[in-house]
Image (cartoon, rainbow, N blue to C red):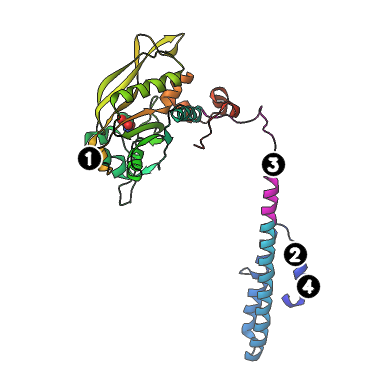
Amino acid sequence: MVFAENKNDILKKIKDINSFEELEKLRLYYLGKKGIIPESLKGLASLSIEEKKTKGQEINIFKKFVEEILREQKTILENSQIAKKIKQEIIDVTLPPNIKTAGKIHPISQTIFNIIEIFGNLNYSVETGPDIETDFNNFTALNIPEHHPAREMQDTFYLEGNQENNVLRTHTSPVQVRTMLKNKPPIKIIVPGRTYRSDSDATHAPMFHQVEGLVVNQNATMVDLKSTLVLFLEEFFEVKNLQYRFRPSYFPFTEPSAEMDVAYTKVNNKIKIGEGNNWLEILGCGMVNPLVLENCKIDSKVYQGFAFGMGIERLSMLKYGISDLRSFFELNYRWLDHYGFSVLDNQTRSGL
Ligand code: DAH
């Protein structure tokens, strides 16, 4: 049986194989439970000790030989499969874009580019932070202590099994903390990014986007805050003389706090921002609470600041007339083709 087969023939037989199934068949033929080699080993039982030794050695050498070429052939097959795949998936990155079939920029990305561009012109720089945050950065440092009702307001996703009580950040405000702990004032940043809350209906998604703003220096005032926000919204919505109002509000991390509303009218069922008798809440803001400055190792007797935060989906829906929040995240190509932006429309590139 085995030994009737010449090594060169076996070698040729295995080398000719070009599928994993065939290779496996051959492996079983030689090495499987009922294969030639185990069977020959079983056959040794009836032989004399001397014969067992010589025959046994012979079979083992043969076994090693077969195992070795099977292994080699397997590697050859694997490598050729990888090479084939690479060849199939090759992309010529030097080809010019085919505009007709090119993808589109998602309205959320476009809105972020747009926000960065406007604040960039006001000398703000962009900061980012991780989606997974410590309880300290997301809450405690922002003057939201444990058991504070504001924690429940935010429907937090808690992560299990970690020492820092990590959460999926519920707002972009923890990046204020990160930045203040890392840099000395003057600070002038915006923070666009993803945020998470356990909430899902027509107007809430469990993942959404916010942009945070923070200015810390020796003389920032509420007037600066107001004029910055008015200027931003006029640029963003491309309106002059925006009608707006600031309402007193409460956030633990700002004192005083306010919410800003903008006026709008409905024309043919479409919202037009800028003037009218209706008000739409658009953002939260205030003067940075001195307690937050101190939590971030900034001397509140020397420095003061303002902050603001707003929802990016909201801004995007209002600007581009998108009526359903959920459509942003449905990955519907036809929707994206309609509401998306051509790559060439964008001057700002942020890599976000
Ligand atoms: N973090 C707040 C939220 O998620 C928004 C906010 C309000 C941010 C006021 C601020 C601020 O920086 O000053 O709802």
Which comes sooner in the sequence, label 1 or label 4? Answer: 4
Which comes sooner in the sequence, label 4 or label 3? Answer: 4
How far apart are the alpha carbons under marks 2 and 3?
A: 34 Å
Amino acid, disc 1: Pro
Q: Is residue 180 above or below residue 234?
A: below
Q: Is residue 127 above or below residue 346?
A: below
How far apart are the alpha carbons under marks 4 and 3?
A: 44 Å
Q: Which residue is mark 2?
A: 15
How far apart are the alpha carbons under marks 2 and 4?
A: 10 Å
Q: Position of residue 249 (x, y in %)?
A: 25, 24
Q: Which residue is mark 4?
A: 8
- Secondary structure mostly seen in the magenta stretch: loop
Q: Quadrant of residue 14?
A: bottom right
Amino acid, disc 2: Lys
Which comes sooner in the sequence, label 1 or label 3? Answer: 3
Q: Position of residue 255 (x, y in %)?
A: 23, 30
329 left or right of 309? Answer: right
- Asked whether residue 186 is in view, the answer is yes
Helix, strand or loop under label 1:
loop
